[in-house]
Image (tube, coloured by chain):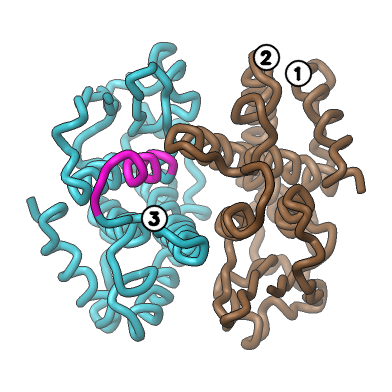
Chain colours: A cyan, B brown
Amino acid sequence: MKIYDVENFPNPLRVRVALAEKNALNSVTFIPVDLMNGEHRSPEFLARNPGAGVPVLELDDGTYISECTAITEYIDHAFEGPSLTGNTPKERAVISMMQSRAESMVLDAIATYFHHGTDGLGPELETYQNKEWGQKQREKAIKGLEYFNSVLAGQEFIAGDTFTVADITLWSGLVFGGFCEVGIPSELTNLVKWHEKVLARPSIAA
Amino acid sequence: MKIYDVENFPNPLRVRVALAEKNALNSVTFIPVDLMNGEHRSPEFLARNPGAGVPVLELDDGTYISECTAITEYIDHAFEGPSLTGNTPKERAVISMMQSRAESMVLDAIATYFHHGTDGLGPELETYQNKEWGQKQREKAIKGLEYFNSVLAGQEFIAGDTFTVADITLWSGLVFGGFCEVGIPSELTNLVKWHEKVLARPSIAA
């Protein structure tokens, strides 16, 4: 199994943390993608992922899987260990819903703010920017953080009382926030506590 | 099991078609949401789905599930019949990936074009519009259709040789396209053929 990625980028981190939670980091060969020099837009890379994003998982039979949600789901099913995506239909649905919300309300909103509302990856890579849209997405992300703070008033983790892919996705949104000064407002104390707890997990602290 | 929705809206249709594929439409009570008069933004509705979108599934134990991907996944696991989300880790990953692409490359792009690049649901409901972003999303959707046409050069359906949630999602994107004049360009012949085949399925034709 191979993963094409950029170490420490938010979406690649989602996959690496899922692997670490499954104690399976050693089962994968990581192949760095030179994103800053546009390798993700080369014909070779686009054949692996027409969406031009990292990470991409290559299975041993040559199948390419992109889209982080699909990759982390694959990892969860392919390796032993506590489930990150749920076991019963209801657990799976709740985790899937909360992960979708973590993506749309925080991670994707911050990513769009980064690429449109700030200099992003610089003028050569950011070929189209819409500043106003970027700013709106920043506001959306802050509202998203407020929402998750309210969720955490009644439970330990984003999708209930166990750590799941939904927590990984929200955490990676905050990693992205670190690139563009979107942090947790200090009054969101449930979220601050959750963040500390998540940062202390061996899969993330290591 | 209850579903709060608006009949014939694109995302609600995804759930209704998934139920029809499972022969389970009669297992659900549908409760109409008066979206045109803003019921989806009422405190009662926001308690069911803070994202203010339809559909929302209410389980018999009172749990609310929103986000269409989560709802269709629940339906697939809760009812008998051919799998719409895959059985093996690899099948699941491929279907999940292709469904994510159908969402981001077509359905979500067309939805954003509709709400920002056209009059959308009218001035009372469209409280913020970004016309330029809307137009860009229209361009993205057309490129997405070109991508799926290329995928269909080698296989019967979006995620392989069986009908899955990825097909439902792409089809619902085209339903949305019908609201804002985004259709399949006639030169995309693989996609045109796929569309005819999908429209003839009993779950959709009925």
Q: Is residue B66 visible?
A: yes
In the image, are marks 3 and 2 on the same chain? no
Q: Secondary structure at mark 3?
A: loop
Where A58 sits versus B59, above or below?
above
Q: Identify the residue under disc 1.
A: B190
Q: Identify the residue under disc 3.
A: A85
- Residue drawn where x is 22% and y is 23% of the image: A31
Residue B158 is left or right of residue A86, and the answer is right
Within the image, what quadrant is residue A167 found in?
A: bottom left
- Report how far apart the C-alphas of labels 1 and 2 lie in the structure: 6 Å
- Residue drawn where x is 74% and y is 59% of the image: B12
What's the residue type where badge 1 is placed? Answer: Asn
Q: Secondary structure at mark 1?
A: helix
What's the residue type where badge 3 is placed? Answer: Thr
What's the residue type where badge 2 is placed? Answer: Ala
Determine contact: label 1, label 2, CB under 8 Å: yes
Within the image, what quadrant is residue B185 found in?
A: top right
Pointer 2 local density, CA inside 10 Å: few below 14, some 14–19, many at least 20? few
- Mark closer to the observer (3, 2): 3
Which range is magenta? Answer: A70-81
Q: Identify the residue under disc 2.
A: B153
Q: Is residue A72 magenta?
A: yes
The subunit carrying tag 2 is B
* Percent position of residue A174, x then y: 28, 59
- Report how far apart the C-alphas of labels 3 and 2 lie in the structure: 33 Å
In the image, are marks 3 and 1 on the same chain? no
- Residue drawn where x is 75% and y is 69% of the image: B28
